[in-house]
Image: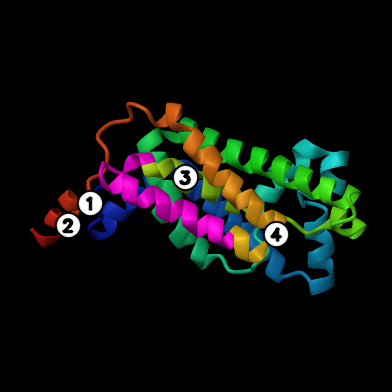
Amino acid sequence: MRIIRGTDGVRAYIRSAPGTYVWLAILFVTTVALHHMSPEFEEHFLRQRSTNIHELSRNPVRVLVASAMWIDSGHWIPYVVLYTVFHAQAERWLGTLRWFTVCALAHVLATLISEGALLLAIRDGIAPHSAVNTLDVGVSYALAGVIGVLTYRIAAPWRYACLPVVLVFFGVSLAVERSFTELGHFVSVLIGLACYPLARSRGKAWNPKETLAALRG
């Protein structure tokens, strides 16, 4: 893992992960657009781009793509940090195509699995029928999938300490929240871990000891 120094280093880092920062730029534009909408219109607008059961049954491809271009929190800066720490690292390591594949698999499969579980819950009377129109946009499933695959970026034995932490973090969130969104996050991490074939033979794994030594030097 390279240490970034100076303005030139930041520019080079951004250029080394074009997909990550183009995606961030799109999220910036869409977030600014949301800030110019009234709360009522914003909810209606996002619901039409949500990967809920109703919209998935009408136009699944459109909403699966559109939902990944919006964040409903209204806060873009935290995503700059998260994308730089996780997505950019994964893209630089895997290459843009493989990184995008992990993101797409996590986003699409976790959405379909979690919404499928929700549909079963509605049919069994566990969840209300109104849940078919749940507002569900965002990029967190892709992020969770990338976090999963990044465990292979870490050298042993650090990897074996990191993996349980990741699983426990998302597992506890699922156990506490007991929501279909948290189910999607947990599934996304598992999908990222299942992407090991894409991560195999992608160069030397990152050793934290080497980075600490470089910082001290």
Q: In the rendered structure, which amino acid carries the disc numbered 2? A: Leu
Q: In the rendered structure, which amino acid carries the disc numbered 3? A: Gly
Q: CA distance from mark 2 to mark 1?
A: 6 Å
**Near-viewer residue (190 or 44):** 190
Q: How many marks?
A: 4
Q: Residue at x 77, y 40 (%)?
A: 62
Quarter of the figure with residue 113 = top right
Q: CA distance from mark 2 to mark 3?
A: 23 Å
What residue is shown with label 4?
A: 179
Label 1's element?
Answer: helix
Give whichever of discs 1 and 4 has the lower sequence position: 4
In this view, the mark in front (2 or 4): 4
Label 4's element?
Answer: loop
x and y, in percent, of residue 50 in the image: 77, 52
Q: Residue at x 51, y 60 (%)?
A: 79
Give the prevailing secondary structure in the magenta stretch. Answer: helix
Q: Does the rendering let one see residue 169?
A: yes
Q: Are marks 2 and 1 in contact (CB under 8 Å)?
A: yes
Quarter of the figure with residue 151 = top left
What residue is shown with label 3?
A: 148
What residue is shown with label 1?
A: 208
Q: Residue furthest bottom?
A: 39
Point out the stretch of residues depicted in magenta. 152-173
Q: Is residue 37 above or below residue 138?
A: below
Label 3 Cα crowd, 10 Å radius (few <14 / some 14-19 / many 20+): many
Q: In the rendered structure, which amino acid carries the disc numbered 1? A: Pro
In this view, the mark in front (1 or 4): 4
Q: Residue at x 65, y 43 (%)?
A: 110
Label 4 Cα crowd, 10 Å radius (few <14 / some 14-19 / many 20+): few
x and y, in percent, of residue 202 in the image: 33, 30
Q: In the rendered structure, which amino acid carries the disc numbered 4? A: Ser
Could you tell whether 90 is left or right of 29 in the image? left
